[in-house]
Amino acid sequence: MDKNLNILSLQYYSYPDAIGGAWKVTFELNSRLAKKGHSIHLITCKPSEDLPDEESIEGVAYHRIASASAKNAWSLACRLWGKITTVCKGKSVDIVHIHNPLTGFLALLHPALWKIPVVYHFHSAWFDEEKINRRGDKYSGYFKKVRGIVLLLAIRSMEWFCFFRANQILLLSTYSLRRFRRYFPFYGTQTKIISGGVDVEEFRPATNMRERETLRDKFSLPQGILILLTVRRLHYRMGLENLIQALAIVGEKEPDIKFLSLIAGGGPLQETLSQQIADLNLQNKVRLTGVISQDDLPKYYRCADLFILPTTMIEGFGLSTAEALASGLPVLGTPVGATQNILGSINPRMLFEGIEPNALAEGILDYLKNPKNFSDLSTLCRERATSLYSWDSAVDQTEELFCKMTRSAKS
């Protein structure tokens, strides 16, 4: 490493302010680069107004924009430019690291960043995410449809601007690379795959049955029955409605098998999922836990017997999958995105046949009837996580890339 770098990181929300896979990736990379001596300035938006404007977390300088200012592009741009000006006054920025296309697009218009190398971290396409989220909205009328089309075109334009401006695109998996190439088919763009990671010290198996029992008592979870865990943001592409329907099918086919399914997370589907659970009379078999704190999350993994990932589309990596594997927890996942490679390379039995409720039900029934066949995979799951999904490796590769880019920019 030639010198300690001054890195400007841009994200709309970020952990620990908000919980989500992309936000956690941003946090892990930033905090670990800070521990290696680099200066990290993160500009992000507040999900709630009780957070301070400026704060240092794990060596990373957080510069937060008020949530009211983040609700329209003009006020967001004004506040964002002000933060950039402040950061650039103290010391020149060596690398701009973009994790979000909206903040990235607005930031790159600032003259202070025009000649600085840019890395864009492609977590997923905002364009695709917006199309999926709109499926849950009750849009009607000509003008609303036109407004939706215009918004999607604007989103695509902002993303493509960031891609053209970036000197390097980072991706989490080969699946993300393929998806990026279809979305942005300009092959001159430099790309590099750096897998996401997991803290294998924090996410680990229970040391013995006593620890599991103690943790179940702590979280008021029943002893002596199988616990199925899902950790997801409650959004449409996550397949949670399919999962609940599948659990109803399981209950009908095998009413004597006792289990409890925990769905952890928050999001716009909270009420919809609660109503679905009530309509299907699954209150004794399915529990929405809400968002679990980072301190408690690894402990929930240790309580569980199986992790379920029911995603219906766009799974660029699946941070929760890596966390489950590191915890020695067998995973059943849909054959979507990177999940197909991650789980299929361990054991094809860990993949559902499809994304539909019936396919999920068949896989869950296979597990409930033969849990020993899956628990035997625990050691292999743990070994795979520790060997392939190391944050140390991801950070070392990122640091090497950043240093190479700054040397090239100055030569």
Image (tube, rainbow, N blue to C red):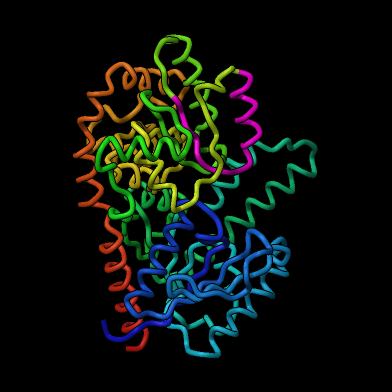
Residue 30 appears in which quarter of the rendering? bottom left
Residue located 57% across and 62% down the image: 12
Whether the magenta-drawn stretch holds residue 267 is answered as yes
Can residue 171 be seen in this snapshot?
yes
Q: Quadrant of residue 46?
A: bottom right
Residue 155, percent from left and from top? 61, 56
Quadrant including the N terminus: bottom left
Q: Is residue 395 above or below residue 222?
A: below
Residue at image coords 50%, 32%? 239
Magenta-span inclusion, residue 371: no
Residue 108 visible within the image: no
* Vertical placement of residue 402 versus 49, above or below: below
Horizontal side of 228 relative to 72 (left or right) equals left
Q: Magenta residues?
A: 260-279
Where is the C terminus found, in terms of image quarters?
bottom left
Nearest the eye: 301 or 337: 301
- Does residue 186 sit above or below 210 in this rendering? below
Residue 251 location (% of width, % of height): 47, 14
What residue do we see at 55% from left, 52% from top? Answer: 126
Q: Quadrant of residue 79?
A: bottom right
